[in-house]
Image: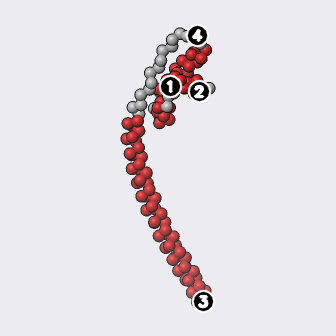
Amino acid sequence: MSELLVAIVAKLEDSSSKMAINVGMLKKKLEMTHSELSLVKRASANSSSKTNASSKVKVPKLLSFEGLRDRKEIENFLWDIKEYYSKVQGTTIEAQARIATCPSANAKSWWHT
């Protein structure tokens, strides 16, 4: 009976030491996660101030229709209107990126084909 008790105590001590090692590892991981979280918070705070500065992107003014009865000219004008209003109404980062990459008049034919 005492041999059985000694074996149980030995297993409990072994389990206890393994558990202490695991708890130590978990504490280290928690500290690392906490430091990473603080870095992410700082980065997001910095990026939000940059986002406000970049939201002042100017949308190129819409050119007037010159009245030419050319199919390509009409398509370009209608496409300009559609793109202009989609960019003016958008406040997301994706919309701001589209505003910045607005094609010039020469690139329109290539852009929407």
Callout 4 touching callout 2 (CB < 8 Å)? no
- Residue at 45%, 66% in the rendered image: 28
Please name which of the two marks, 3 or 1, marks the residue nearer to the observer.
Answer: 1
Local crowd size for mark 4, using a 10 Å CA cut-off: few (<14), some (14–19), many (≥20): few
Please report whichever mark, 3 or 1, sits nearer to the chain's N-terminal start. Answer: 3
On the image, numbered disc 1 is attached to which residue? 104
Query: Please, what secondary structure does the residue beneath circle 1 have?
Result: loop
Give the amino acid at mark 1: Ser
Please report whichever mark, 4 or 1, sits nearer to the chain's N-terminal start. Answer: 4
Any mark on residue 3, and which? 3
Give the amino acid at mark 4: Arg
Give the amino acid at mark 3: Glu
Please report whichever mark, 2 or 3, sits nearer to the chain's N-terminal start. Answer: 3
- Residue at 58%, 89% in the rendered image: 2
Image spot of residue 58 (x, y percent) = 41, 28
Q: Is residue 56 visible in the rendered structure shown here? A: yes
On the image, numbered disc 2 is attached to which residue? 110
Query: Please, what secondary structure does the residue beneath circle 3 have?
Result: helix
Please report whichever mark, 2 or 1, sits nearer to the chain's N-terminal start. Answer: 1
**Which image quarter holds the N terminus?**
bottom right
On the image, numbered disc 4 is attached to which residue? 69
